[in-house]
């Protein structure tokens, strides 16, 4: 009999590096319009295991895809001190009125994304920054769409491709640590070029100034971590100083915090079992038996699958005698919930493009 598919089971698959690329594919497909052919989708060969897990990844791996919703009556982003155009920094923001932020993620190593929607039509803009080493791979991949044309983007000669008449993307050469890609949908080329002219280069600090009120900024994150830790027991091997997060949403911070604690207790449990230390095994079981009562997980339980995944890992430890399948899930925790100290050595490439 086949084992049932669970959130933790899918989370344990070694597919961490493929998640962002798959979700980019799922989230970026433009709607079909009756007045013209559907735009060309992003050219990807999705690995079978990723395709099978796509629906669950939207919740288990969805930490980075939780949008920040603003008041629909909002008319403009937070104004910046300087005017539009090239300036110091390696990230970019939109300074035009009438646009609001719908999604943001920012990681100092892997890059990030800032998405906008227009208040009066279906236009959307995605600004993505990726590590400099991925620039060539993404240009090669986008060349599958067709022949690019030159366009100025923030003072650099850049390459633009057309997915369709109302869907374009442009990649800017490397600036500092990152390369920018900007995609505009729901607008023709003339309108897209006009929006590009209203982008501004910024650094990390000024990006933070541009975010909606719901965002958790750098100077607020320590307090957010402390709040997420309420009611959660820590093992002696994990201190508060060890628990870090770069999350910009409550969901992301809770995921980072509960992953750190759960991973530490699983490590404790596995080490104690290996050394036949019954008292230490029981200590880990007692700690993770409280997981269903952690306030932070209850807070986000209706927003995605993260809470269910953590609870499934905790339940395996509490049961005390993992089946072969349960042990496979525990062994897959490095990729499944991002536990440190293991995991696959690099994720799969899709059409030769490493996951961002």
Image (cartoon, rainbow, N blue to C red):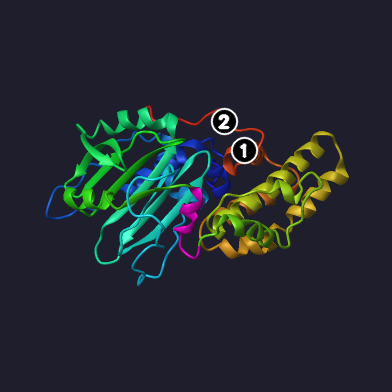
In the picture shown, does residue 10 fall above or below 306? above
Estimate the spatial distance between the alpha carbons at disc 2 and disc 1, rounded to whole Å: 8 Å
Position of residue 30 measured from the top left corner of the image (x, y, whole percent): 26, 50
Q: Residue at x 21, y 41 (%)?
A: 162
Q: What residue sits right under mark 1 in the picture?
A: 334
Q: Magenta residues, as a range?
A: 204-214
Q: Residue at x 20, y 53 (%)?
A: 191
Q: Residue at x 67, y 60 (%)?
A: 292
In what element is the residue under mark 2?
A: loop
Q: Earlier in the sequence, mark 2 or mark 1?
A: 1
Position of residue 197 measured from the top left corner of the image (x, y, whole percent): 27, 50
Q: Which residue occupies the extreme left position in the image?
A: 35
Q: Which residue occupies the extreme bottom position in the image?
A: 73
Residue 206 covered by magenta stretch: yes
Residue 287 covered by magenta stretch: no
Q: What residue sits right under mark 2 in the picture?
A: 344
Position of residue 156 measured from the top left corner of the image (x, y, whole percent): 30, 37
The reply to whether discs 2 and 1 touch (Cβ–Cβ < 8 Å) is yes
Please state, as top left, top right, bottom left or bottom right, where the N terminus lies in the image: top right
- How busy is the neighbourhood of tag 2: few (under 14 within 10 Å), some, or many (20 plus)? some
- How busy is the neighbourhood of tag 1: few (under 14 within 10 Å), some, or many (20 plus)? many
Q: Residue at x 67, y 47 (%)?
A: 260
């Amino acid at each position: 009999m086949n084992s049932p598919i669970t959130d933790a089971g899918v989370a344990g698959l070694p597919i961490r590096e493929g998640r962002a690329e798959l979700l980019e594919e799922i989230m970026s497909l433009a709607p079909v319009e009756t007045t013209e052919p559907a735009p060309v989708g992003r050219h990807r060969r999705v690995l079978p295991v990723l395709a099978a897990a796509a629906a669950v990844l939207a919740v288990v791996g969805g930490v980075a895809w939780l949008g920040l919703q603003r008041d629909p009556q909002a008319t403009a982003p937070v104004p910046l001190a300087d005017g539009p155009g090239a300036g110091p920094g390696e990230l970019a923001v939109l300074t035009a009125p009438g646009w609001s932020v719908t999604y943001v993620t920012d990681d100092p190593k892997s890059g990030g994304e800032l998405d906008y929607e227009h208040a009066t039509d279906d236009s959307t803009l995605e600004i993505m920054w990726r590590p400099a080493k991925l620039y060539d791979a993404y240009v090669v991949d986008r060349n599958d769409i067709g022949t690019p044309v030159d366009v100025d983007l923030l003072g650099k000669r850049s390459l633009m491709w057309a997915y369709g008449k109302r869907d374009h993307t442009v990649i800017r050469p490397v600036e500092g640590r990152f390369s920018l890609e900007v995609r505009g949908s729901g607008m023709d080329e003339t309108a897209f070029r006009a929006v590009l002219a209203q982008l501004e280069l910024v650094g990390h600090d000024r990006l933070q100034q541009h975010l909606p009120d719901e965002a958790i900024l750098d100077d607020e994150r320590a307090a957010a971590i402390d709040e997420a830790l309420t009611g959660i027991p820590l093992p002696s091997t994990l201190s508060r100083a060890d628990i870090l997060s770069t999350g910009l949403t409550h969901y992301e911070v809770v995921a980072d915090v509960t992953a750190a604690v759960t991973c530490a207790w699983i490590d404790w449990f596995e080490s104690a079992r290996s050394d036949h230390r019954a008292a230490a095994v029981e200590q880990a079981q007692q700690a993770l038996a409280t997981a269903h009562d952690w306030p932070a997980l209850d807070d986000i339980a209706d927003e995605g699958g993260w809470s269910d995944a953590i609870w499934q890992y905790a339940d395996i430890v509490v049961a005390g005698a993992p089946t072969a399948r349960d042990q496979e899930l525990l062994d897959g925790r490095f990729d499944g919930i991002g536990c440190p100290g293991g995991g696959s050595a690099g994720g799969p490439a899709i059409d030769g493009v490493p996951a961002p």
